[in-house]
Image (cartoon, rainbow, N blue to C red):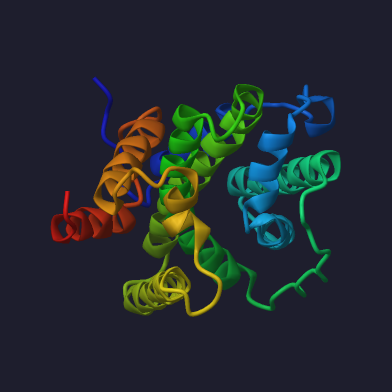
Amino acid sequence: MEQAVGIGSERHKELFCRVFLDTHEPYDPARLAWPDLHVGELERLRALPFWTEALATEANAAARISALGRTERDPLLRRAIELQGYEEARHSRLLGLMADRYRLPVTEEVPDPLPTDLEWAFVRTEYGECFDSFFAFGLFDLAKRSGFFPSPLVSIFEPVVQEEARHVLFFANWVAYRRKQLSPALQPLHWLRRGYALCSQAWQRVKTARGFRTGDFTMRGHESIDASISPRGFLDLCLRENSARLGRYDSRLLRPVLVPAIARMLRTLLPR
């Protein structure tokens, strides 16, 4: 039987860092077997609206997280954070190679300057990733089952999608561990800052999903991939995929809970 770990303890830190480090999958994007696609498949890929944003997001996240890792004094935490920065940079390289090979509509953007408060930037970035990955898990499964993505591309992106699950798992435990390291007097302030970061990311995604900008593909992309699935059915799919992907790891570790909780509440308000 697995022994419980106290959240914020040294055992907790060692567990969530070791799980993250030990489940890293080595691969080189330049050596992947990129398939030749026919005209219809290329048109579907090029019609997706998020390539520029995806590349910029991964590149900026990689720079911020890698910089945070360099400032971390704890050797084990530093290794884990730097590995996440490496994986985010690898995502960016993979997307860049894909964009070049298939001539995807990508506009080169100037990288964001590094923020002064790297830890706060990490918190904001990862709460955004908690939202995006939850819906991306469902979208990926939908694209795979519907044939929207050719099976060779599914094979290439499977490790990438699973890495996002590892990232949000690591973050959920890292942020809880960080709070426990603070004095009792500072923990409420940490909780409030976390709440602000989470709410701001949630509101940003609600605004874009409602069309205040261009629409949030991670939240509404099912409409482009398979119009036959209802919003409630899509939320059910996201919940199943989220549980399956995060369920691969040690059950003693914390999981992100807010986004699944919001999805469960919303699905009760939607028609079948």
Lateral position of residue 127 relative to residue 67, left or right: left
Using the rendered view, name the quadrant where residue 73 is placed.
bottom right
Whole-percent x, y for residue 232 in the image: 25, 50
Q: Is residue 4 above or below residue 56?
A: above
Q: Is residue 43 above or below residue 38?
A: below
Nearer the observer, 243 or 141 = 141
Whole-percent x, y for residue 117 in the image: 63, 76
Q: Is residue 125 visible?
A: yes
Nearer the observer, 36 or 175 = 36
Q: Is residue 83 visible?
A: no
Q: Residue furthest front?
A: 40
Residue at the spot 43% in from the left edge and 76% down from the top edge: 207
Nearer the observer, 58 or 237 = 237
Whole-percent x, y for residue 136 in the image: 48, 47
Using the rendered view, name the quadrant where residue 248 is placed.
top left
Residue at the spot 59% in from the left edge and 70% down from the top edge: 121
Residue at the spot 64% in from the left edge and 69% down from the top edge: 118
Lateral position of residue 100 relative to residue 156, left or right: right
Q: How many marks?
A: 0
Using the rendered view, name the quadrant where residue 110 is placed.
bottom right
Quarter of the image with the N terminus is top left
Residue at the spot 63% in from the left edge and 58% down from the top edge: 49
Whole-percent x, y for residue 149 in the image: 58, 33
